[in-house]
Amino acid sequence: MRDTQNKKDEIISMAMEVFAKRGYEGTTLDEIAGYCNITKPAIYYHFKNKLALYEYVLCTQFEEMAKRILEHTDSGSAEERLRAYIVTFGQYLIDNPTFSAIFSREISIGGATLPQGCIDELSKTLKRLSKILEDGVKEGIFQDENPFLVQMMIVTPLSAYHTTKPLRQKVADIVDNKYLTVEFADVVDSLAEKIISAIKI
């Protein structure tokens, strides 16, 4: 039983890597099986098909991200909770680099292959963000803003910055600019300050 669970964990881990590199459409179960040194039927033992595997690996990530965000934005002023929201999302990307790549791909294609379960988990975080922004308006510190726009102000630059590290390094080798090599954690803090400043009254 232990070997079976270990093999399932290996399939999930490798699937995350391949989906991050090739996206849902560009990934095959044959490729994942090859990397895991198993046969494709061995994947079918754990997952019905490629969609089931993609849904499992991705929705598990969305569920964990939503759990962390909800835990870290449960109390405090609206400003404190918004900062915690942004920093928690950024830290999740740091802890889960393959998730960042997959999420960026999904954003670029309008979530075309994003399973419904993932959308449900993402909706939990958007609902929390909406509440934070509403509370900020009631507290007299935030302007009334579109929550989805604020969500994109958080997700898009952080996901893009995180996934473009190799490109930024190549450019930094040519262009002498200190900002091209700023560490991701520092960018998260900087973005949090910029977003909060942008929506404050």
Image (cartoon, rainbow, N blue to C red):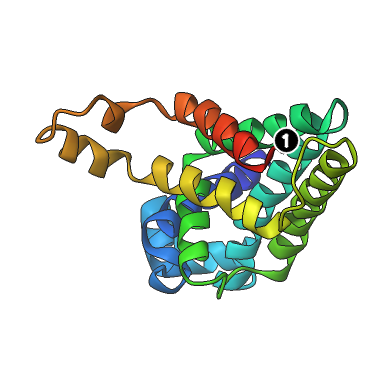
Residue 98 x, y percent position in the rendering: 47, 46
Residue at 72% across, 35% down: 82
Of residues 169 and 62, the one nearer the viewer is 169
**In the rendered view, would you say 79 is above or below 50?**
above
Instruction: Name the image quarter holding residue 20.
Output: bottom left
Residue at 43% across, 65% down: 23
Residue 195 x, y percent position in the rendering: 59, 39
Instruction: Name the image quarter holding residue 136.
Output: top right
In-image side of 101 versus 155 (left or right): left
**In the rendered view, would you say 92 is above or below 35?**
above
Residue type of the residue flagged with mark 1: Leu
Residue marked by disc 1: 82
Residue 9 x, y percent position in the rendering: 58, 45
Say whether residue 134 is visible: yes
Farthest-out residue, front: 201
Say whether residue 37 is visible: no
**Local crowd at mark 1 within 10 Å, few (<14), some, or many (≥20)?**
many
Residue 36 x, y percent position in the rendering: 42, 51
Of residues 14 and 110, the one nearer the viewer is 110
Farthest-out residue, left: 174
Residue at 24% across, 44% down: 167
